[in-house]
Image (cartoon, helix red, strand yellow):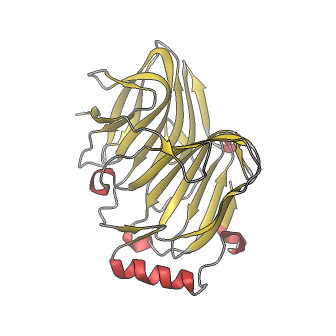
Amino acid sequence: MSISRKLKNIDTPQGQPGFLGRGHVARPVIQRSFAESDPFIMLMDDMLDKKDNTPSGGPHPHAGFETVSLLIEGEMGEMKSGDFSMMTAGSGIIHTETIDRPTKMRLLQLWLNLPKKDRWAPPRLQDLTREHAPHLSEDGVDIRLYSGELAGLVSPVQNYTPMILADITIEHGVTTVLQLPANFNTFLYVLDGSVLIGEEETLLYSNQVGWLDIFNSDALSNLKLKAGEKGVRFVLYSGKPTGDAIVSHGPFIGGSNEDILRLYNEYRQGKMKHISTVDEGQRMLL
């Protein structure tokens, strides 16, 4: 018997002033506890319209998880629109995000939990440009895959936590069915337009987040999608829950309060290296 997915919860996150100052609006896409969102910890939709040359941001540490960045619009450092970057912070790393010139951009940055056995993995960086991301465009459906496997596409990105991440556009009047592992926690974030989800055709609008039901089965499930009146563009996140409890504090994720204290001590003692200094084998341009 085939498993059909349906929409379980809808959130409408609101933008708020971001830490980069004037012109920065940050929308916290994930509004649920980690017990509900596992393996996804946090997702920020950062929209920046910077008008001056005053530097914003700077170097900061991370440990115990992965940052997964998808640039929707504009440029940031060496990233251009449609580029993807996954940084495994793992045992601890420092990276720099500084913007020192006028720029307009939109960035989706996810914090992805690492399985307990891989939490302290050696830091690594994987960059995938838009041009090299597996791509499918047919019958009014356009899929650009950045992580995992979907619709016959396979991403070259290596995953500790199994995850599908895809930027999907469906033209008005088109219906399609995607197959996802039934035991993957899945949500859609609509960037533009609207989409009807499942056999129930529950409507999800621009800037809304739709969480699907989840099953205790590793079989494939069917997700029916029908584009709304003006078509739809959304980002699909689907990942296998780690089942591990986490402690989150500042830039660090751990399994206990002791982990957090240790990480702060290591950072203060200068034991965390900058991501630019990691071995070449841990820096992959895909």
Where 35 falls versus 74 (above or below)? Answer: below
Q: Pick the residue in front: 110 or 114.
A: 110
Residue at (47, 39) in percent of width and height: 15
Residue at (55, 58) in percent of width and height: 158
Where 90 falls versus 50 (above or below)? Answer: below
Where does the image place residue 212, in percent across and percent down from the top left?
A: 31, 38
Q: Pick the residue in front: 117 or 40.
A: 40
Where does the image place residue 271, in percent across and percent down from the top left?
A: 59, 84
Where 6 falls versus 274 (above or below)? Answer: above
Q: In this view, does 28 lie to the left or right of 35?
A: right
Where does the image place residue 218, in percent across and percent down from the top left?
A: 31, 49
Where does the image place residue 153, in percent across and percent down from the top left?
A: 55, 40
Where 62 falls versus 127 (above or below)? Answer: below
Quadrant of the rendered image containing residue 222: top left
Q: Tag count in the figure? A: 0
In which quadrant is the N terminus drawn? top left
Residue at (57, 22) in percent of width and height: 138
Q: Is residue 147 left or right of residue 212?
A: right
Q: Pick the residue in front: 233 or 223.
A: 233
